[in-house]
Amino acid sequence: MIDIVIVGAGIAGLSAAIKACDNDGVVSLISPDYSERSQSVMAMGGINASLNTKGEDDSVKQHFTDTMNGGCMINNRDAVKRLCDDAPEIISWLEKNGTCFSRDSEDNIDMRNFGGQKKKRTVYAGSRTGKQIVSALINACRKKEFEGKIKRYTGYRFLSLIFTDENECCGVNCIHEDNEEIKSFIGDAVIIASGGYNSLFGKILGSIQNDGFTTAKLFTQGVKLANLEMVQFHPTTVKTPQKRMLITEAARGEGGRLFTMKDGEAWYFMKDFYPELADLMPRDVVSRSIFKVSEGGEKEVFLDLTHLDEYTVKVKLDEVYEICMKYLNIDPLKTPIPVFPSVHYFMGGIETDENHKTNIKGLYAAGECSCQYHGANRLGGNSLLGAVHGGWVSAENAVLEKPKGEVINTLDEELKSLESYTPKDKSLSNTLNTISEIMNDSMGIYRNEDDLKIGLDRLDGLDCNVNGKYYDYLKVKLLIILSKASILSALARKESRGAHQRTDYPKSNIDFEKSTGVIYENGRIVIV
């Protein structure tokens, strides 16, 4: 049997665990919280696959072309091809594992339009697709747990990688959130499925559990990252007392239209700007359009669902309806929804090849933390697909690993660092807020060299000695490094492409039709 250590128990981690077991692996599944509370359950809109049941002559080839075009051609072509080829099989696999997708009048799995795609290709389960998939995969994992093939460790956060004397990854050290117990997990291979680095931008749409610590720590341990400048803003979000919340792209897929007031009348600007796809242009385009017509947020922009029928809004878009009624106190059947873009997804992260291998032998990454499918802009519906597919592929390859060297366990070093740590007076929350303020100021929808350099200078002046636990101190220290790496990546890409828009370099440049790699060498961040 091959021992696989998986960090993260969202859709990518769950898919990897199931596939590893199916390939004679045994799994240690580690996460800070239960799968039911993973960011994956927040995914509303759907999952892409070219099933071609709508009479639109869709194909896997067109799915591939749309994905590459959406990513502005810096996606990994081999990885994207396999992603699109495997998509129909993934839908079948999810359904066999208990995912209840919506059906059409002919009892086919239903599909809807989504941004950046001309065909109905997005399979969905009402507006709770992520929840349905997570529930199905949890049940499938429980069967494996009962068989003794999966053992869960809930409440633990990743702390560091463990290597052999031949620089192979063979495990992880983790710390328990409640009692600060540090525990080592040794295996034949490690799969990281820790999600995006939400904490860099503060109270955005994603889960606070995905704080970026894991990606940042891996970076300082020699793991290569890529495309950190590619940060996706979802165009339609709403402000609530707690945080911004997502109004799914499915609302536009079902016919919702964006407008602002002009000369006393509603101006449906997307139809004027982009007649062919209108409101279903890729997310980076829609976000920039909203920013433009709102004059940087000075004027209100609305998503109009008032012309849609009650069944579409209350049933097919039920979660949108509930968010509006509960948090905004408006009925979207009667009143347009005030929206504005917000940070939503990180196309960049741990650089992986088409087999989800990193530059470290024995270490794999899957899901949002992994960078290869989405390039400069992710298409809606490809995130859930990428998470499942990444879990599949990483597991299939990880079970073939077998370290050759002797384990060098750093557990004693971690314990000594924990025991010697003394909390300081500086406020943890204030420091994290400052990091997110810097990143939002310098890495917004539009960037320029002056703002990026100001952001770097401000990060240099931050103190990571905070009043918190040992993990909190490490998190602040590492998030500062990851923030700097993101800004340096943005400075290095002297062009505008997809989610990366520079006012001082407003056009795309063929010289930058490639990923921006970044490594950490001798305490320095190096763009490669």
Image (cartoon, grey):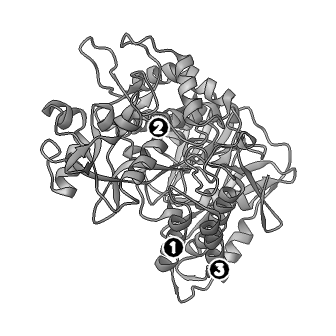
Q: 10 Å neighbourhood of mark 1: few (<14), some, or many (≥20)? A: many
Q: 10 Å neighbourhood of mark 2: few (<14), some, or many (≥20)? A: many
Judge whether residue 279 can be spotted in this image: no
Lateral position of residue 220 relative to residue 90, left or right: right
First in sequence: mark 2 vs mark 3: 2
Disc 3 is placed on an element classified as: helix
Disc 1 is placed on an element classified as: helix
Q: Is there a contact, CB below 8 Å, between mark 3 and mark 1? A: no
Give the amino acid at mark 2. Pro
Q: Is there a contact, CB below 8 Å, between mark 2 and mark 3? A: no
Q: Residue furthest bottom?
A: 425
| Residue nearest the observer in this picture, 69 or 406 | 69
Q: Is residue 458 above or below residue 346?
A: below
Question: Which residue position is annotated with label 3?
Answer: 419
Task: Give me the C-alpha separation between circle 3 and circle 1.
Answer: 24 Å
Question: Which residue position is annotated with label 1?
Answer: 432
At a point 74% along the width and 54% down the height, the residue shown is 518
Q: Quadrant of residue 394?
A: top right
Q: Which mark is residue 282?
A: 2
Give the amino acid at mark 3. Glu
Task: Give me the C-alpha separation between circle 1 and circle 2.
Answer: 31 Å
